[in-house]
Amino acid sequence: MALRPDLAIIADAVPAGARVLDVGCGDGELMVALGAKGVDARGLEIDPANVTAAIARGQSVVQGDANRDLADYPDGAFDYAILSQTLQTTERPDRVVEELLRIAPRAFVSFPNFAHWRVRLALLWNGRMPVTRLLPVAWYETPNIHHVTVSDFRDLVRARGIRVERVWHLSGDKPTSDAAASWRAEHAIFLIARG
């Protein structure tokens, strides 16, 4: 089975031999791909069923909550931290990003862009939060508690003195340019590092 496009980008970008913590690792799909290229991947996952599934795949995963449990990891314990499609579900995304960069010098953060033109159009025409391929449930069913945009995330990292090393934007499952990414990109993947 092929990796989700954002996970494929991350898997390709992490170098062999790296030590990685995948925060919100789901069923361990990315960890399996990373392990195949010689990466020492560990996972933190809140959903007990996903923890069980990841362990059944032979992955090293613990049940925990990114909002509280990242504080238990020592400074610099990993080379990379990964937070894929989880930022918008955290209580304080700013604090979670700070924790990622405390436990690893670099972090991958990916999220759906809530300023994509389809989201804007749905709000304009219908006056309702949209249901899309990346946001497939009604607003009252979604785990998303923060509606982050590409511009919002850039502002956050700039304000915190965090360096953006690389950015990938996806429209559908295909890469798209940085030009007008705030409304063209459905999804963004940032590789960030401490300034």
Image: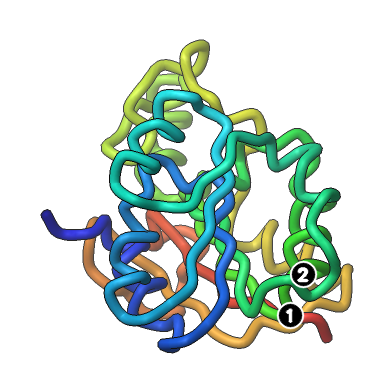
Please tell me whether residue 147 is drawn above or below residue 156 in the rendered image.
Answer: above
Helix, strand or loop status at disc 1? loop
Q: Amino acid at mark 1?
A: Pro
For the residue pair 84 and 154, the one nearer the viewer reads as 84
Q: Amino acid at mark 2?
A: Leu
> Circles 1 and 2: CB distance less than 8 Å?
yes
Spot occupied by residue 135 in the image (x, y as percentages of width and height): 38, 33
Helix, strand or loop status at disc 2? helix
- Left or right relative to 30: residue 75: right
User: Is disc 2 surrounded by few (<14), some (14 to 19) or many (20+) residues within 10 Å?
Assistant: many
Residue plotted at (76% across, 34% down): 91
Residue plotted at (53% across, 59% down): 42
Task: Name which quarter of the figure residue 106 lies in.
Answer: bottom right
Residue plotted at (55% across, 39% down): 45
Find residue 125 and name its label: none
Spot occupied by residue 25 in the image (x, y as percentages of width and height): 47, 48
Q: Where does the N terminus fall, quadrant-wise?
A: bottom left
Task: Name which quarter of the figure residue 80 lies in.
Answer: bottom right
- Left or right relative to 162: residue 21: left
State the CA–CA distance, disc 1 to disc 2.
5 Å
- Left or right relative to 65: residue 31: left
User: Is disc 1 surrounded by few (<14), some (14 to 19) or many (20+) residues within 10 Å?
Assistant: some
Spot occupied by residue 29 in the image (x, y as percentages of width and height): 31, 52
For the residue pair 85 and 181, the one nearer the viewer reads as 85
Spot occupied by residue 155 in the image (x, y as percentages of width and height): 76, 65
Q: Which residue is denoted by mark 2 in the rendering?
A: 101
Q: Which residue is denoted by mark 1 in the rendering?
A: 105
Please tell me whether residue 21 is drawn above or below residue 120 in the rendered image.
Answer: below
Q: Where does the C terminus fall, quadrant-wise?
A: bottom right
Q: Residue furthest top?
A: 140
Task: Name which quarter of the figure residue 62 lies in.
Answer: top right
Please tell me whether residue 185 is drawn above or below residue 72 in the rendered image.
Answer: below
